[in-house]
Structures are given as structure tokens and as C-alpha cells.
Image (cartoon, rainbow, N blue to C red):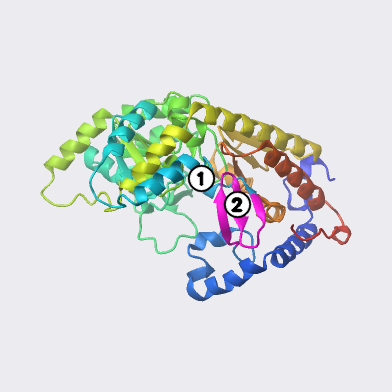
């Protein structure tokens, strides 16, 4: 192995070896998945980009893997291969695929109505539980976290009479135009790669500062013209970035000083406990958004607001001319969502489940640190409750740009494909690993062994000596 000091250079894992391994693993995938290949040909004829959602092509695969069944923490593809799933729908299935109580509640409700645009008994129960669990006084339901964030920003502008918002560089708040920005050359600019953006972000209504930079935050808010800061409690989509000690206290104090609302997007940080990061760390936001996992994987999101913000929202609503608010969709808060919400909150988001998930994620994080130490890799592993992430840098990054700089795309894509060929799935976007109540320690050990094996082969100096593994079982 080359010396540890060289590990962040492209040559630490020889490019020729990475290319040879990628070719070998791609060939193995193609040979092992004939039914997925056959379905991919049909998908390519009828779906743009060859998939019903083009994000599905972000997996490092020559053609999409078609899933036959997902249950607990396991996937089975159409060729009959089983996988231990550490992606879990990129968090949507945090509590496992089709948890039995949620599946039963959905099945029972399915014959009693899917869309009524009227509340029922489950809505009353869920409202009480959301307030008890997360501490916010008033709630609304959306279909996705993207919608919830979009709606909440509209309410924030209406309640404050201000137009500007602030986000942190490297954040992710779904498909919300206002938040799809990066800090480039000291100002907010549309994030690279965006298609069809209509000017948001670069028009001065969205401000961007680095996470963990209280001085930049205070400077951006000093004009008292920012309606809201929309913030993940920890950055999770550009590679994990945890808040510095005291950062959240400063964030809360500075927003209050300048009359700016603090909105927390808990969609990913729900991994931290039954009340999310907010309750686990005693935060006091004006509003929170929770999506993806809150209803056990059924499309659903909720947003909660403080009593004070609810009062200002009501004032703005009643003061407006007659007409539509433009906030909400017809399918939001449908009976199927409430059946899933109640079952998931009541049965899956329990203290016991979270304790098991956090302990298992801790074992996974410790195991990864051990693997990297054996390979003389000075890589960091960060844990956020049931979630952990590894990054190719010695210290956990403090900003989105630092997390981005630590990425090694060629190695990461190889690793993801290597794991998948061995019955292990992690998120395709970065090195995020998530455990559910259904995850087994055997799956954790298998993942650690496979990461170890991949790194061993990736460090081979002569790609001609690489073994040819047997096809996937």
C-alpha cells in the first residue's frame, strides 16, 4: 500500500485497477441479471432515460435492477437474487419495507376510501401524537417533503411580509426551486446541472452561507429582511456534515434577533430518535418538516408550526382577498396517508426500535473504522442515530464544500456496484448507510467484509492479477 499521506490523491487506488474492477463487476452484473436486462429493454422503449424516474439511473449499473419484492430490510430482484438493503429507499423505508402494522393499516383503509378531502378519526389521533412527539402546536399534511418545504416557505413569506430566505451551502430540501442553489464566488447561484430553472436563487431572493459559519449567517441576516432560514439540523445529502458544538444555539439566537423564522427540515435527521434531531438535541424551531419515512414509506410529509407562527399564518390568511391560497394539493391528507401515519407512529417509531437501530448503526460505524484502519486509510465515519456515512477525509467535514471535496466518485461507484453484486445495497448518491428495525447483525458483518474485500482489490498495483469472482448466486 502507498503511504497514508497519499490516500487522498487519485493514485492511492490505481486508476487502471479501478477501471479493471469496474469492467469486471459490470460484466458480472450483466451476466447475473438476465431478467432485469430484458425488462430494461422494455423500459427503454417507453420511459424517458429508460426508467420511470430518471434518478433510478443514478445507480452505477449498465441497466436498472428490477425489484420483485421488498420486505423488512431485504430486497429480491426479478432474477431471484436477495439483497440486504442499507439504502432503504434513500430513507423512505427507514423502518423497513412494508412494516406489518403499516401494511395492514393501508390494506384495511384501501377498501374504505382513498381520497375524500375530509378528515377522519385517524387525523385527530395523529395530530395529538405529532404535537406530543415533536412539540409543535399546529400541523399540516403534504404528499412529499418537497411540497411541505415549498408550502412552509410560502407561509413564512406570508406571515413575515418578507421575500428572502436563507439556506446552507450543500443543503437538500427536495425539488424546491428556491433552495436549489450553491455558494459560488461568494453568492447564491443556481446549482450546477439544473435543468429549466427559472431564475430562483440567482435573483437575490435566496441567500446561501456555509454551514457552521455563524459570522456569515449573522452578516446575511443583519438587514432584517429574511423571512426564514430553512435548515437541515445536519447536512445529509452532500455527504454528512454535523453541526459544530453551539452552532444550533447561535442559529436560534441570531434568527430571533433579526425576526427571521427558523424552519428545520427533519426528513433525513428523523434517524436521530422518535422526535427527530429537534427533540434529541432540545432545539426550539418555529417549524419543522418531516417527509419520506414518517408514514412508513407511503408518499406523505407533515409540517408543524409553533403557536406563534400559526397565529401569524392565520392572520395572513384571513387578511388576504378571497381566493385560493395556492398552498396544498387535493391528495394531501388523504385517508390512506393517515392510516399509514398512525400505524407508523404508533408501532414503528418506538423508543425500543430507535434504541436498536442506533446501537446497530454504532456497530456498523465502529466496524467501518476498523476496516479503514486495516487499510491505512485515514477516513472518517460519522453517525447520526440510525444513519452513518464514511468520507475520504481525516476529519468530519464542517461545510458542504468540504464534504464534496472528500468524494471519490470512481471508487464510490465501484464500491456500490461491488457491494450490489454481493447482495448488499447502499444509496447510489453517496456513502450513506441506514439501518432499520429489521436489519440483522449478519447483514452488518457481511457489509463490512465486502467493503474490506473491495478495498483490498482496489489497492492492487497490477490489475492483471485481479481474481475473477464467480457469478452472483
Say if 241 sits above or below 82 in the image. above
Left or right: 288 with respect to 445?
left
- Total numbered badges shown on the rendered structure: 2
Residue 394 visible in this rendered orientation of the protein: no
Q: Using a 10 Å C-alpha cutoff, classify the residue at mark 2 as few (fewer than 14 neighbours), some (14 to 19) or many (20 or more).
A: many
Residue 465 visible in this rendered orientation of the protein: yes
Of the pair 35 and 62, the residue shown nearer to us = 35
Image spot of residue 337 (x, y percent): 36, 46
Find disc 2 in the rendering and name its residue: 75
Residue at 65 percent of width and 62 percent of height: 79
Residue at 45 percent of width and 38 percent of height: 232
Q: Using a 10 Å C-alpha cutoff, classify the residue at mark 1 as few (fewer than 14 neighbours), some (14 to 19) or many (20 or more).
A: many
Image spot of residue 459 (x, y percent): 81, 50
Quadrant assignment for the C terminus: bottom right
Say if 26 sits above or below 437 in the image. below
Left or right: 63 with respect to 251?
right
Asked whether disc 1 touches disc 2, contact meaning CB atoms under 8 Å apart, the reply is no
Viewer-nearest of discs 1 and 2: 2
Q: Earlier in the sequence, mark 1 or mark 2?
A: 2
Q: Which mark is residue 93?
A: 1
Q: Picture quarter containing residue 126?
A: top left
Q: Which residues are magenta?
A: 65-83
Amino acid at each position: 500500500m502507498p503511504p497514508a499521506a497519499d490516500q487522498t490523491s487519485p493514485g492511492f487506488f490505481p486508476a487502471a485497477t479501478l477501471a479493471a474492477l469496474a469492467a469486471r463487476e459490470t460484466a458480472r452484473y450483466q451476466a447475473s441479471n438476465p431478467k432485469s436486462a430484458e425488462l430494461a429493454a422494455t423500459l427503454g422503449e417507453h420511459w424517458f432515460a429508460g426508467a420511470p424516474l430518471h434518478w433510478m439511473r443514478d445507480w452505477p449499473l449498465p441497466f436498472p435492477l428490477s425489484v420483485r419484492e421488498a420486505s423488512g430490510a431485504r430486497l429480491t430482484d426479478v432474477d431471484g437474487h436477495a439483497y440486504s438493503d442499507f439504502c432503504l429507499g434513500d430513507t423512505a423505508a427507514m423502518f423497513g419495507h412494508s412494516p406489518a402494522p403499516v401494511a395492514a393499516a393501508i390494506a384495511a383503509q384501501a377498501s374504505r376510501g382513498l381520497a375524500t378531502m375530509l378528515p377522519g378519526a385517524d387525523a385527530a389521533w395523529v395530530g395529538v401524537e405529532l404535537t406530543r412527539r415533536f412539540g409543535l402546536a399546529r400541523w399540516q399534511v403534504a404528499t412529499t417533503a418537497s411540497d411541505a418545504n415549498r408550502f412552509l416557505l410560502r407561509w413564512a413569506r406570508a406571515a413575515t411580509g418578507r421575500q428572502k430566505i436563507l439556506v446552507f451551502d450543500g443543503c437538500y430540501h427536495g425539488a424546491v426551486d428556491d433552495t436549489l442553489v450553491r455558494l459560488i464566488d461568494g453568492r447564491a447561484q443556481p446549482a450546477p446541472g439544473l435543468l429549466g430553472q427559472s431564475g430562483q436563487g440567482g435573483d437575490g431572493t435566496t441567500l446561501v452561507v456555509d454551514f457552521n459559519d455563524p459570522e456569515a449567517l449573522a452578516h446575511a441576516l443583519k438587514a432584517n429582511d429574511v423571512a426564514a432560514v430553512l435548515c437541515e439540523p445536519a447536512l445529509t445529502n452532500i455527504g454528512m456534515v454535523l453541526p459544530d458544538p453551539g452552532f444550533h444555539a447561535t442559529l436560534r439566537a441570531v434568527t430571533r434577533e433579526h425576526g427571521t423564522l427558523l424552519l428545520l427540515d427533519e426528513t433525513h435527521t428523523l434517524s436521530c430518535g422518535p422526535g427527530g434531531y429537534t427533540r434529541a438535541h432540545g432545539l426550539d424551531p418555529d417549524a419543522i418538516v418531516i417527509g419520506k419515512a414518517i408514514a412508513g414509506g407511503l408518499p406523505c410529509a407533515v409540517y408543524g408550526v409553533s403557536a406563534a407562527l400559526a397565529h401569524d399564518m392565520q392572520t395572513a390568511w384571513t387578511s388576504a382577498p378571497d381566493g385560493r391560497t395556492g398552498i396544498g394539493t387535493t391528495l394531501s391528507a388523504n385517508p390512506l396517508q393517515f392510516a399509514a401515519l398512525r400505524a407508523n407512529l404508533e408501532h414503528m417509531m418506538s423508543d425500543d426500535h430507535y434504541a436498536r437501530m442506533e446501537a446497530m448503526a454504532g456497530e456498523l460505524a465502529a466496524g467501518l473504522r476498523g476496516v479503514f484502519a486495516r487499510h491505512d486509510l485515514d477516513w472518517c465515519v460519522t453517525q447520526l442515530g440510525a444513519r452513518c456515512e464514511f468520507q475520504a477525509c481525516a476529519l468530519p467535514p464542517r461545510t458542504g464544500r468540504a464534504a464534496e471535496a472528500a468524494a471519490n466518485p470512481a471508487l464510490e461507484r465501484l464500491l456500490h456496484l461491488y457491494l450490489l453484486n454481493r447482495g448488499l445495497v447502499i444509496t447510489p448518491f453517496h456513502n450513506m448507510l441506514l439501518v432499520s428495525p429489521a436489519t440483522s447483525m449478519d447483514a452488518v458483518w457481511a457489509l463490512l467484509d465486502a467493503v474490506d474485500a473491495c478495498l483490498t482489490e482496489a489497492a492492487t498495483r497490477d490489475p492483471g492479477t485481479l481474481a475473477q469472482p464467480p457469478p452472483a448466486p
